[in-house]
Image (cartoon, coloured by chain):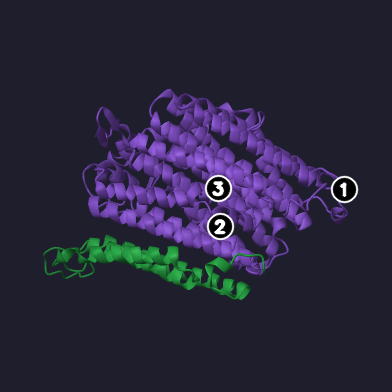
């Protein structure tokens, strides 16, 4: 048995196995359990990197559960209907999986010291590993129903993690809000899956996409899918759960929550670019009013871009008025999601052109950068909470004297999130501004203005937390423990590396994802013509 | 027309469920609403899988004729199991919320009194 052939299955199996072994190992020794969880998360990361490398060099990887992959694909190409669950990993999935494995690894390293004084840690680590398995499953699967199952696994474990502080009413209320939103969203997804199954007798994404008729029921399914997944990725009219969830969860959990939100965003991308991809590119006009033809891609683009603009503006403005550090960062995270969607929506209107590709590159690169930047800020907020037991911006002050490293990390996060040159945020935001400007200059102007506002917000916060006179109540504050500093240093290191060499990342990781988005045919053909 | 009755039931269940989630202020009633939506979706899946006069797919000594496709049944079973897990989690959240706030009114939870 060659391990390289079974990578997609192992990426799900190893965190799942680890999750259920954690309570057992926790009975032996706490330290052993922490090492074990870090090892499992690290191993998952390693496997994801190996798989990503395979995808980037050899093209799409498929894995059929319970049967020989080659034989099954041959059978499909000769006309046998597909009833098995299969994983299909293309550039987009691999790109998202890299984010999805990296952040939980940092989260468990960070948790070592951060969660040390809490009880119930065996459940905590179990849930984090389950969440990792769930979101990696969402990103790798090639089957709509399987996507629903992994979506539910992710939702249940993240809701339980958000409500981890059951002694705090607000945390439980945030968890409840999250599970209500997620379960309704997931049921909408299931309804859409049933609509597809009823029409095309298939559950596989590639098979459905290939036989997509774009009938009335498909339009209903598109609305259900985009609404449900958009709600879960925190777009503005449906964002109210996000600040609560991000703000009330512990910092390490928030870091692991970011990729789950992005996994839903991946769902939006997969649905609009692959499932309905053929209708986007070659589709007949939906309606003809006089001389004007209305195409699906323009309609989706207008919808997504307007949502994105509202998301950016509301996110930044709400961030301005927050007095709680974590809630403020959560609103900044909402604004960042707006930037990604702005680029992706703009790209939809000019598909297959150079501008469209550039916008997609910017949007995809920004997905990765946002996860890192916002994640770093949350970790810093966690470190501040750990040291001072305080998150209110009105009470914090003068911490730079006692927490030197944390200050530097916050500065890096601040510059990155507001798009200042040496950091990675600049690289992706520049791509977005340049490409969106060519679609419509107003979009670019709003984006830049909001980015400046974001800088203003964070400079204010930086000043009120770290600078200013020494405060008597914080005189004995110590620097955060080593494991937390290591966690922050890993992310800060990646941020600076990406900022200094953006071209390396764009060419090697982002471009395959963009190619996967703009050519839905390759994803479909990989299944239907026997994995060519 | 008579064959469409299950589909009307599906739409009815989902709409009643959504109404309960959106407009009811009691947490338990919201959870009931979610369960109703779930039943609607499950009923839809089961209805899709049924063909008139077909035999159950578990029957090995089939008398011949058409068989129902077992996939929708499998999907429904999975969905029911997931639904139970979600229901249990939501109800346990409600227990904790009630302990903290002594109320189940949506408008009164999430405040500062802890």
What residue did someone put label 1 on?
A470
Percent across and percent down for residue B39 are: 34, 68
Both labels 2 and 1 in a single chain: yes
Closest to the camera, between mark 3 and mark 1, is: 1
Q: Which residue is mark 2?
A: A129
Q: Is residue A2 visible?
A: no
Q: Is residue B60 left or right of residue B89?
A: left
Disc on the earlier residue, 3 or 2? 3
Quarter residue A370 falls in: top right
Proximity of marks 3 and 2: CB atoms separated by less than 8 Å = no
Q: Which chain is purple?
A: A
Asked whether A230 or A131 is in front, the reply is A230
Q: Residues within 10 Å of mark 2 (few under 14, many from 20)?
A: many
SS of the residue under disc 3: helix
* Chain letter, colour green in render: B
Chain under numbered label 2: A
* Viewer-proximal residue among A107 and B31: B31
In the image, what residue occupies the spot 35% across and 39% down? A523
Question: How far is the residue under mark 3 from the one under mark 1?
Answer: 40 Å
The answer to whether residue A202 shows anywhere in this view is: yes
Tell me the residue at 58%/38% (across/down).
Answer: A369
Q: Which residue is mark 3?
A: A101
| SS label for mark 2 | helix
Can you tell which mark lies on residue A426?
none
At 64% across and 52% down in the image, what residue appears? A327
Measured Cα–Cα span from mark 3 to mark 2 = 10 Å
Please, is residue A78 above or below residue A197 in the view? above
Q: Nearer the viewer, mark 2 or mark 1?
A: 1
Q: Residues within 10 Å of mark 3 (few under 14, many from 20)?
A: many
Task: Give the quarter of the image for residue A278.
Answer: top left
Chain at tag 1: A
Q: Earlier in the sequence, mark 3 or mark 1?
A: 3
């Amino acid at each position: 048995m060659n391990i390289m052939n079974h990578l997609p299955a192992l990426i799900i199996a190893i965190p799942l196995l680890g999750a259920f072994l954690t309570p057992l190992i926790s009975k032996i020794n706490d330290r052993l359990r922490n090492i074990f969880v870090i090892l499992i998360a690290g191993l998952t990361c390693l496997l994801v990197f190996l798989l990503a490398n395979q995808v980037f060099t050899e093209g799409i990887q498929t894995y059929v559960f319970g049967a020989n992959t080659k034989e099954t694909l041959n059978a499909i190409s000769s006309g046998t209907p597909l009833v098995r669950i299969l994983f299909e990993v293309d550039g987009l999935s691999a790109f998202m999986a890299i984010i999805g494995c990296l952040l939980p690894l940092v989260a468990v390293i960070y948790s070592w010291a951060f969660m040390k004084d809490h009880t119930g840690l065996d459940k905590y680590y179990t849930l984090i590993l389950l969440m990792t398995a769930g979101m990696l499953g969402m990103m790798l699967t090639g089957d709509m129903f399987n996507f629903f199952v992994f979506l539910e696994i992710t939702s249940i474990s993240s809701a339980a993690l958000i409500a981890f502080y059951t002694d705090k009413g607000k945390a439980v209320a945030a968890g409840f809000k999250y599970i209500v939103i997620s379960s309704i969203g997931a049921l909408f997804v299931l309804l859409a899956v049933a609509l597809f199954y009823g029409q095309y007798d298939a559950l596989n994404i590639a098979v459905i996409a290939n036989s997509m008729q774009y009938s009335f029921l498909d339009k209903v399914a598109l609305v259900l899918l985009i609404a449900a997944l958009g709600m879960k990725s925190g777009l503005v009219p449906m964002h109210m759960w996000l600040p609560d969830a991000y703000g009330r969860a512990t910092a390490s959990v928030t870091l692991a929550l970011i990729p789950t939100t992005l996994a839903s965003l991946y769902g939006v991308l997969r649905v609009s670019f692959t499932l309905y991809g053929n209708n986007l590119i070659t589709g007949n006009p939906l309606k003809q009013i006089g001389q004007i033809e209305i195409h699906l891609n323009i309609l989706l683009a207008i919808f997504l871009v307007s949502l994105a603009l509202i998301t950016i503006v509301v996110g930044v403005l709400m961030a301005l008025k927050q007095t709680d550090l974590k809630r403020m960062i959560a609103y900044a995270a909402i604004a960042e999601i707006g930037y990604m969607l702005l680029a992706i929506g703009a790209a939809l209107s000019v598909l297959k052109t150079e501008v469209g590709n550039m916008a997609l590159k910017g949007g995809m690169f920004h997905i990765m950068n946002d996860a890192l930047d916002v994640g770093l800020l949350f970790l810093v907020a966690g470190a501040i909470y750990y040291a001072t037991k305080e998150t209110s911006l009105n009470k914090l002050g003068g911490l730079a004297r006692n927490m030197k490293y944390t200050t530097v990390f916050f500065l890096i996060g601040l510059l990155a999130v507001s798009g200042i040159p040496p950091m990675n945020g600049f690289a992706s935001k520049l791509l977005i501004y340049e490409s969106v400007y060519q679609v419509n200059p107003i979009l670019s102007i709003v984006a830049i203005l909001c980015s400046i506002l974001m800088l203003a917000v964070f400079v204010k916060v930086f000043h009120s937390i770290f600078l200013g006179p020494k405060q008597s109540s914080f005189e004995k504050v110590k620097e955060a423990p080593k494991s937390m500093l290591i966690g922050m240093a890993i992310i800060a290191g990646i941020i600076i590396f990406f900022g200094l060499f953006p071209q390396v990342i764009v060419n090697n990781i982002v471009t395959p994802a963009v190619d996967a988005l703009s050519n839905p045919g390759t994803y479909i053909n990989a299944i239907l013509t026997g994995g060519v | 027309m008579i064959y469409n009755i299950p589909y009307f039931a599906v739409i009815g269940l989902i709409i009643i469920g959504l109404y309960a989630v959106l407009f009811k202020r009691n947490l338990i009633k919201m959870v009931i609403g979610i369960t109703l939506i779930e039943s609607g979706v499950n009923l839809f899946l089961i209805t899709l899988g049924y063909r008139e006069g077909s035999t159950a797919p578990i029957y090995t000594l089939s008398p011949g004729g058409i068989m129902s496709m077992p996939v929708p049944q499998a999907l429904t079973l999975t969905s029911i199991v997931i639904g139970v897990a979600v229901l249990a989690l939501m109800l346990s959240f409600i227990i904790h919320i009630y302990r903290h706030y002594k109320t189940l009114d949506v408008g009164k939870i999430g405040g500062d009194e802890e």
